[in-house]
DNA sequence: CTGAAAGCGCTAACAC
DNA sequence: GTGTTAGCGCTTTCAG
């Protein structure tokens, strides 16, 4: 039970050494003799000493805090955001960093505030849009940073993301390989495309290009998610393209409703229709029919973002200088076949 | 574009005033003449000055940071956690505070670390268990704090939570009023009860007590969530209590599977069976059948936690000293009737 | 391998 | 209404 604030000076006195020695024992920045180190450590323990974060930040101009900016958009799937955030927090701790949580509420200015004040010495931005208002401010701060998501003009920024173009292509290939020739895409909410969130657009680009190459017809419809919206979307799709034999879903909150509605229509998955999803592993596994899917590697993205940012903050680490250069780090997608995709049914005689 | 670090001294020089004047302009802690204030503000703008967080923390012994500790448990429903976290972050900003995100990964020690180092000057703990290992450490730090959830021994702590006992009672009352006499409860994962998370236990206490008073029979079964687990749980329930005419669900990931399976069994909701859920508003509204439910007021809980903690950190605010006393703040539950609950069916002649 | 001492940038008495 | 100044607790040269 420490009463008042125990300072480094207290520890030094108690251990019979100078303040700087205590500091160096703590930081390991110069070698200390065994006995001295032990006396200091003993004093630290006995006094219950904890270095003061503010003083340390002031003297060293490093806060050991990474800011994580996570805009709160109701149309984004929450668990993925959360998984990224937790991966960031956990990885950060393993590098001795803490994480400051910033929401979108405060606007792009928050980037400048935490950057310029030295509150954080590095930043990670989530949910990056193609034209993101935070990027100019980010560049100005001059702080190490990593983006989760890739903007239209990534030059000068370090980015991590799933390779969504490859993801779209992969889904099409899988279905085309099974003989499907008419595919419908149930996409994210219209707002996601309007806002020009990169991943949604890139998925469609990759998907459409590959579909063209493979001679597959694609109908793409955004969807808000939920039963009501999905019912309408599904009606439209089946109306416009009655021969549709496969769905690619990129919208977590449309997954369950889609399976449920297909079942009500008496269309069996995968015998009558195939479904492939782009979603977190857990959603795919827990669905009414285990889904063939491309996983969103949330954990890996969070982890890498921290590591990239740390490499920039501490050049000359294990990764060498190379890691400090801005780069776009696209994770290769993996498609896992589960129960929801199968051979295209023989064309109906109609 | 500010080149090096602009300091308060730079601003003072530029404005032709002393450092303290600049400081007071910023803090508003003493009155400044109009002209002086303007010259200072102009200088701040021209120089692009941003106060250094570390220096400020050291000099004032306040970091203006609230730590939010959010254990990552795979069996807790993520969106609720997230909504609380975002509410905390948003409310905190409106009080000029930032939020430091702590996961459970680091263990209870994290509480001491951020408390004792002055990194945070107040803490909020989520997902509090009845016997929570973090509480002794929290008490030791002596920092203002608020718990989201209520421990077995709340004396000395400030807590916010939904009144889960009342919630359980409310669900039973609603169903009893509709004539149901045999109710099954689909609960949280077994691990949640084993861990002695307060809310799950309290819900059952309130629920069982009221059921006793009203002469309603209750069967309670934990459930992991997902289709596989729910199928097993439902089978057991219908086996043990074939006359069950109503379900109370306290497990977000069991909601959709339950509705889906009942439908497959040909049991119509609410004609044949009623369903009442304890879950976030959005889950209830988006379900295949809009659910009669008691909402989990995540946003309100986050907001209050911050306000309680601020009241303790700054006694003498608008709330007066009363707010600074430890207290348990239980939010009254509200049951919203939607489409999933109706009169009990006439007992079958069997 | 260890000490002494000069700040880091800001706040908050204390003066006037 | 404004200026002076003494720290806040730690890091990091510079000496030895």
Image: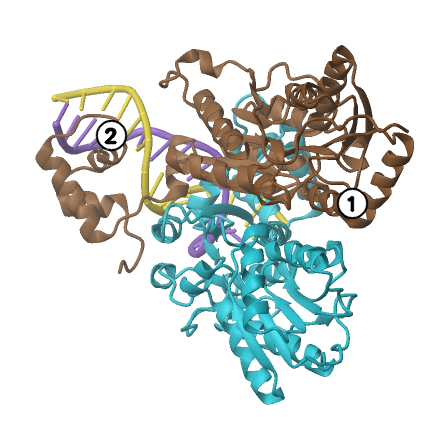
Chain colours: A brown, B cyan, C purple, D yellow
Image quadrant occupied by the C terminus of chain A = top right
Mark 2, residues whose alpha carbon is within 10 Å: few (<14), some, or many (≥20)?
few
Q: Is residue A102 left or right of residue A347?
A: left
Residue B321's image quarter?
bottom right
Residue at 53% in and 23% down: B4
Q: Tell whether C15 sits left or right of B14.
A: left
**Picture coordinates of residue A345 (x, y %)?**
75, 28
Chain letter for mark 2, please: A
A103 or A211: nearer the viewer:
A211
* Quadrant of the rendered image containing residue A330: top right
- What label does residue B299 carry, if any? none
Q: Residue at x 64, y 38 (%)?
A: B40
- The quarter of the picture where the N terminus of chain A appears is bottom left
Residue A313, percent across and down?
A: 45, 23
Q: Where is residue B168 in the image (x, y as percent from the top left)?
A: 60, 74
Chain letter of disc 1 in the image: A
Same subunit, tags 2 and 1:
yes
Q: Earlier in the sequence, mark 2 or mark 1?
A: 2
Residue behind mark 2: A28
Foreground residue, B6 or A279? A279
Left or right placement of residue A76 versus residue A143 in this view: right
Q: In this view, does B3 lie above or below A264?
A: above
Q: How many labels does the image show?
A: 2
Q: Which mark is drawn over residue A266?
A: 1
Give percent across and percent down for residue A298. 55, 34
| Mark 2 in CB contact with mark 1 (< 8 angstroms) | no
Residue furthest left in the image:
A35
Secondary structure, mark 2, is loop
> Which SS class for mark 1?
loop
How crowded pointer 1 is (Cα within 10 Å; few <14, some 14-19, many 20+) is rated as few
- How far apart marks 2 and 1 lie (CA) works out to 68 Å
Q: Which residue is found at the position 67% from the left and 19% from the top?
A: A177
């Amino acid at each position: 039970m420490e009463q008042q604030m125990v300072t480094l000076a207290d520890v030094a006195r108690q251990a019979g050494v100078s303040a700087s020695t205590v500091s160096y024992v703590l930081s390991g920045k110069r070698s200390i003799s065994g006995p001295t180190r032990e006396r200091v450590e003993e004093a630290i323990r006995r006094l219950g000493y904890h270095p003061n974060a503010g003083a340390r930040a002031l003297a060293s101009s490093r806060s050991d805090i990474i800011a994580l900016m996570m805009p709160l958009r109701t149309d984004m799937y929450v668990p993925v955001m959360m998984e990224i955030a937790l991966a960031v927090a956990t990885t950060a701790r393993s590098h001795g960093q803490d994480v400051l949580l910033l929401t979108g509420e405060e606007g792009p200015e928050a980037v400048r505030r935490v950057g310029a004040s030295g509150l954080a010495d590095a930043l990670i931005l989530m949910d990056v849009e193609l034209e993101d208002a935070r990027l100019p401010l980010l560049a100005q701060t001059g702080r190490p940073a990593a983006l989760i998501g890739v903007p239209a003009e990534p030059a000068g920024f370090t980015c991590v993301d799933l390779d969504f173009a490859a993801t779209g292509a992969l889904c099409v290939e899988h279905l085309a390989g099974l003989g499907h020739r008419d595919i419908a895409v149930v996409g994210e909410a219209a707002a996601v495309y309007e806002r020009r969130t990169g991943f949604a657009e890139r998925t469609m680009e990759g998907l459409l290009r590959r579909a063209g190459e493979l001679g597959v017809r694609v109908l793409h419809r955004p969807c808000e998610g939920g039963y009501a919206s999905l019912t309408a979307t599904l009606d439209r799709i089946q109306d416009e393209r009655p021969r549709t034999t496969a769905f690619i879903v990129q919208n977590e909150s449309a997954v369950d409703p889609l399976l449920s509605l297909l079942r009500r229509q008496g269309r069996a998955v995968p015998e009558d229709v195939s479904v492939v999803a782009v979603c977190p592993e857990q959603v795919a596994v827990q669905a009414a029919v285990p889904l063939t899917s491309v996983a969103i590697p949330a954990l890996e993205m969070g982890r890498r973002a921290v590591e990239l940012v740390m490499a920039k903050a501490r050049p000359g680490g294990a990764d060498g200088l190379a890691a400090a250069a801005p780069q776009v780090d696209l994770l290769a997608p993996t498609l896992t076949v589960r129960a929801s995709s199968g051979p295209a049914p023989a064309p109906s005689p109609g």
